[in-house]
Image (cartoon, helix red, strand yellow):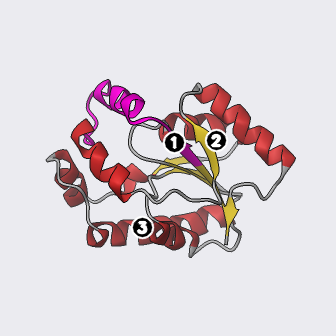
């Protein structure tokens, strides 16, 4: 079973993903760790990535998701902003991925982003991410106004209630 914890920068993907991975005893990966140096440099200089910039990154992540599925699953924190990105991410997995969409007010996202130190994604990039975001109807949509612990509890409750929650083929 593999999960993608998704949303714009600052929504808490990494924190929630790490905690969920611990609860489910699955490995955790951050999609940011798979970006090319050129992509990181581009974002660090305040330039949003294009679909061409993301193509190889998404293909690598799809391959990794297929490998992780064969090893028993994983949790991936990934922005997955567009539907075509999510389709690519699903493409190498035999089973449907579980999608958890962390959503919340722009003001809270900006507050969180401005409090981060040493991250290449600066708060001035949030508008481009929000403009790109295509909210998935099939994902388990959770509000980032809750604590990470509450969000993980909500994910686990949804899994118990319905194993198909947050999946898409």
Instruction: Name the residue furthest left.
Output: 45
| Marks 2/1: CA–CA distance | 20 Å
Please tell me whether residue 144 belongs to the stretch shown in magenta.
no
Give the side of residue 60 with respect to residue 142, left or right: left
Label tally: 3
| Helix, strand or loop at mark 1 | strand
> Is 87 on the left or on the right of 31, as rendered?
right
Q: Identify the secondary structure beneath mark 3.
A: helix
Residue at label 3?
Answer: 58
Q: Quadrant of the N terminus?
A: bottom right
Give the magenta part as a residue range.
101-122
| Picture quadrant of residue 137 | bottom right
Residue at 58%, 70% in the rendered image: 90
Q: Is residue 99 visible?
A: yes
**89 or 131: nearer the viewer:** 131
- Is 145 placed above or below 27 here? above
Q: Is residue 123 left or right of residue 94?
A: left
Residue that badge 2 annotates: 21
Circle 1 sits on which residue? 103
Mark 1 and mark 3: span between their CA atoms? 21 Å
Per the model, the C-alpha gap separating discs 3 and 2 is 21 Å
> Residue 49, position in %: x, y?
26, 60
* Residue 9, position as x, y percentages in the image: 38, 43
């Amino acid at each position: 079973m593999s999960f993608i914890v998704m949303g714009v920068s600052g929504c808490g993907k990494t924190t929630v993903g790490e905690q969920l991975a611990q609860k489910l005893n699955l490995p955790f990966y951050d999609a940011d760790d798979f970006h090319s140096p050129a992509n990181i440099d581009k974002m660090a200089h305040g330039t949003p990535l294009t679909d061409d910039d993301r193509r190889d990154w998404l293909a690598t992540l799809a391959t990794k998701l297929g490998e992780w599925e064969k090893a028993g699953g994983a949790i991936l924190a990934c922005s997955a902003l567009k539907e075509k990105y999510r389709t690519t991410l699903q493409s190498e997995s035999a089973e449907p991925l579980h999608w958890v969409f962390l959503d919340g007010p722009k003001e809270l996202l900006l507050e969180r982003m401005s409090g981060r130190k040493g991250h290449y994604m600066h708060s001035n990039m949030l508008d481009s991410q929000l403009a790109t975001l295509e909210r998935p109807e099939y994902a388990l949509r959770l509000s980032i106004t809750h604590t990470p612990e509450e969000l993980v509890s909500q994910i686990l409750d949804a899994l118990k209630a319905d194993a198909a929650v947050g999946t898409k083929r």
